[in-house]
Amino acid sequence: MPIPSALTALNFDVRWISLRRVTRLHAPQCWQRWLTDRASLTQHLIRASEGDFKVEVVSQGWGRPTRSEALALGIPMRQLALIREVRLIGNQQVWVYARSIIPASTITGQERQLHHVGNRSLGTILFSDPTMHRGPLQISRLKLSNQQAVWARRSKFFLSGKPLLVCEVFLPALQQVHYKP
């Protein structure tokens, strides 16, 4: 499945459900633990791939977040943010497509490093920062341009009190992995 062409910014401008209880999650059983785990997704993917893991940057640049993303971050809809889209690849298969929205006001001070992540995992940076706080998880089912649907989660992270939004889309190839978070 050609994921980058099937996923566009419009796919992310959907209704997101705040996850309060796992029992209210209507996702298939195979996705529930991936969607609800609050630990580092990067670490899980490294373990699942037995170290055969890499991050491939699809795009990174200044742009306007979707309406849904701007509302989640509490920023004006026309405000530019650094938008980073990557493929998380394990065992030479794209397992996760991630989209991060980083407001310009977040990329100051120590957090200037977020502009220069490159092919490193953003999760590695987030989960190693002692100031990191993660907000509640939100879940959605995204419809792709090829009529397929995939499950996704997003959450707001705070570094030194400054917000960024990370969305992770779980792709069908991950279902074949014999690993659960």
Image (spheres, helix red, strand yellow):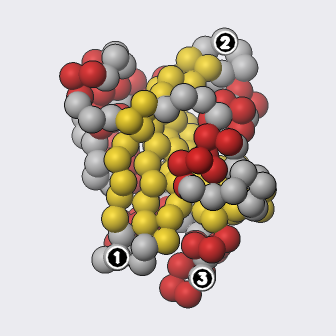
Disc 2 crowd, CA 10 A, few/some/many (<14, 14-19, 20+): few
* Residue 131: assigned label: 1
List x then y, in percent, for residue 34. Answer: 33, 35
List x then y, in percent, for residue 116. Answer: 64, 74
Label 1 element class: loop
* Comes first in the chain, label 2 or label 3: 3
Instruction: Tell me what residue is drawn at x 30 percent, y 27 percent.
Output: 32
Residue at the spot of label 3: 108
Label 2 – label 3 distance at C-alpha:
40 Å
- The mark closer to the camera, 2 or 1, is 1
Q: Amino acid at mark 1?
A: Thr
Label 2 – label 1 distance at C-alpha:
40 Å
Instruction: Tell me what residue is drawn at x 42 percent, y 30 percent.
Output: 17
Q: Amino acid at mark 3?
A: Thr
Instruction: Tell me what residue is drawn at x 53 percent, y 79 percent.
Output: 111
**Is 75 located above or below residue 99 in the figure?**
below
**Is 106 located above or below residue 83 in the figure?**
below
**Is 114 located above or below residue 95 in the figure?**
below
Q: Quadrant of residue 126?
A: bottom left
Label 2 element class: loop
Label 3 element class: loop
List x then y, in percent, for residue 101. Answer: 61, 56
* Comes first in the chain, label 1 or label 3: 3
Label 1 – label 3 distance at C-alpha:
14 Å
- The mark closer to the camera, 2 or 3, is 3
Q: Is residue 171 left or right of residue 61?
A: left
Residue at the spot of label 2: 147
Q: Is residue 48 visible?
A: yes
